[in-house]
Amino acid sequence: MNENDEDDFDDITSDDARRSKKKRRRSRELELLTIRNFMKTENGRSFMWRCLEDCSTFIGTFSSDPIQSAFNSGSRKHGLWLVMELKEAAPDEYVMMIKEHINE
């Protein structure tokens, strides 16, 4: 193997890395677009609110039972992740969702 072969390998690796990064970026853009479209409808926002409530996103997770407390914390972690996704993809619709459900 000579120096030129190593350069060719670096070029291939670099091209693969660029393609992989581009594929991940497109995938992420599609995820965000899907969330935006979902949050455009009242039914979509209502469903997301229900998911956030089901995850105990907006309440404490403490329980005197440590296993239950751990479970609650895991559920809440997922809910907080979903909040971040919603805020990134559709911040205006996220606020609208809160306004629609805050007084229920």
Image (cartoon, grey):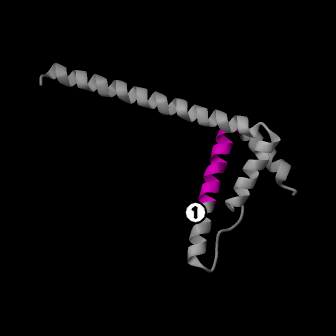
Q: Is residue 32 magenta?
A: no
Q: Is residue 95 visible?
A: no
**Amino acid on which the number 1 mark rests in the picture:** Gly
Residue of label 1: 74
Q: In percent of the image, x 68 and y 68: which residue is there?
A: 60
Q: Is residue 96 visible?
A: yes
Q: In percent of the image, x 64 and y 76: which residue is there?
A: 63
Give the magenta part as a residue range: 76-90
> Which image quarter: residue 33?
top right
| Residue 58 x/y as whole percent | 72, 60
Q: Quick one: quadrant of the C terminus?
A: bottom right
| Residue 54 x/y as whole percent | 70, 60
Q: Quick one: quadrant of the N terminus?
A: top left
Residue 46, placed above or below residue 16: below
Please state if 11 lies on the left or on the right of 102 as rendered.
Answer: left
Residue 2, placed above or below residue 31: above
